[in-house]
Every structure is written in C-alpha cells, then in structure tokens.
Amino acid sequence: MHIAWTSFLLALVVITVVPGPDFVLVMGNAVRSLRQGIEAALGVLTGLLVHATLATVGLSALVAAAPTALFVVKAIGAAYLVHMGFMTFRSAGKPVGEQPRQRNVFLRGMLCDLLNPKVMLTFLSLIPQAMDPKAAPLPQAALLSAVTVGVFAVFWVLVVPSARQLGRLLSKPRTRAVFERVCGTALIGLAASVLAT
C-alpha cells in the first residue's frame, strides 16, 4: 500500500492552520476561559470524528454528489454560523457568567464542525487523492481519516493554551469586547463564504 503521505500531510497542515469557523469558535471561547476553550475544541473534534466516519463509509460522498442535499447542508451550516456570530457579537464584553454562549459550548463546537460543508468536502477531496488505487479503499480511508483527526487534535492542544495567553492580553473589558465583536463578525462573514463555495 503506497499512500502519498508527503503531499497528504503537507495539504493537511495547511488546511488545519488556515482559520475557519471552528478556529474562530474555539479561539473566542478559549479567550474567555480554558474550560470553555477545551469544551469547544472537544466538540469540534467530535464533529470531525463524525465526518471521518461518514467519509470512510461513503455517506459524505453521496451528499456531495447530490446538489440539492449539499445545498441544504450548506444553508443550514451558514444559518448556524450567522446565529453564533450574532450571539457572540451580542455578548461581547459581558462577564463570563452573563454570556449565553457559555452554556453548551461542547455542543456548539460539534454543530459548528458538523454543519460546515467545507470539512466534509475536505475529507472527500484530500483523502481520496492520497489513497493507493491498487489497495483496499476502506482501511486506507479509515487510516487517513484517523490521521486527519489526530492532526487537528494536536493543533487544538497547541492553540487553546495560546489563546489563554491572548486572553490575558485582552483582560480589559473594552479590548475583549472588540476582539469578541471581531470574532462574531468573522463567523457571519464565514457563513457567506460557506454559501458562496
């Protein structure tokens, strides 16, 4: 089995470090508290595991091949990002206890990832290109999907503590409010990007 590990890992690292909805959500929560950052990251990783499983068994390919189904996923994902963006914008600068997004952070992270069609399409475009066409596809897809989730897990282990350091810099309520409004605006902008792709 000859998997194209070099090109696969290079592309995966680029995809991992380019900020998207998951990054904005985890970063916004991690700045507030380490616990919220960890919960959001675990939610995102759970969503990734679901995507990895669906891609491995071929269900994601069926959705991607059906334009109507893909549009519905994109529309739901964009609507959810807009909702999160407005919630983040509205709660900007409030104490942690007064923020509605403090609750169900894990669920928000999971839904953010699950409803992001870009994640699904990443699994469908990146993994097949790295696979050996002469070898059995299922074990390769499972292995490459597991590596993808693992790389993202390492990324979050590095990012969440770093975000806490940023949180100390954003200890002033006015500065933190500006940062959170930027995060909220970014989520809304990413919703438009999801629909446009």
Image (spheres, rainbow, N blue to C red):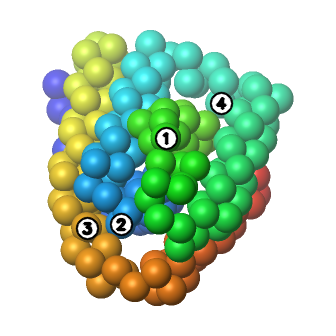
Across and down, in percent, residue 178 comes to 54, 82
Across and down, in percent, residue 185 comes to 65, 71
* Among the two numbered marks 2 and 3 on one chain, the one whose residue lies closer to the N terminus: 2
In-image side of 170 versus 193 (left or right): left
Quarter where residue 106 is shown: top left
Closer to the camera in the image, 138 or 82: 82
Q: Secondary structure at mark 2?
A: helix
81 shown above or below 64: below
Counting the numbered discs, the total is 4
Mark 2–mark 3 contact, CB under 8 Å?
Answer: yes
Tell me the amino acid under the disc marked 1: Arg
* Among the two numbered marks 4 and 3 on one chain, the one whose residue lies closer to the N terminus: 4
Across and down, in percent, residue 85 comes to 65, 59
Q: Nearer the viewer, mark 4 or mark 3?
A: 3
Q: Secondary structure at mark 4?
A: helix
Tell me the amino acid under the disc marked 3: Arg
* Among the two numbered marks 4 and 1 on one chain, the one whose residue lies closer to the N terminus: 4
* Among the two numbered marks 4 and 2 on one chain, the one whose residue lies closer to the N terminus: 2
Mark 3–mark 1 contact, CB under 8 Å?
Answer: no
Label 1 sits on residue: 103
Image quarter of the N terminus: top left
* Among the two numbered marks 1 and 2 on one chain, the one whose residue lies closer to the N terminus: 2
Q: Is residue 43 in view?
A: yes
Marks 4 and 1, Cα distance to the nearest angstrom? 32 Å
Q: Nearer the viewer, mark 4 or mark 2?
A: 2
Label 3 sits on residue: 164
Q: Is residue 15 in view?
A: no
Mark 4–mark 3 contact, CB under 8 Å?
Answer: no
Mark 4–mark 2 contact, CB under 8 Å?
Answer: no
Q: Nearer the viewer, mark 1 or mark 2?
A: 1
Label 4 sits on residue: 64
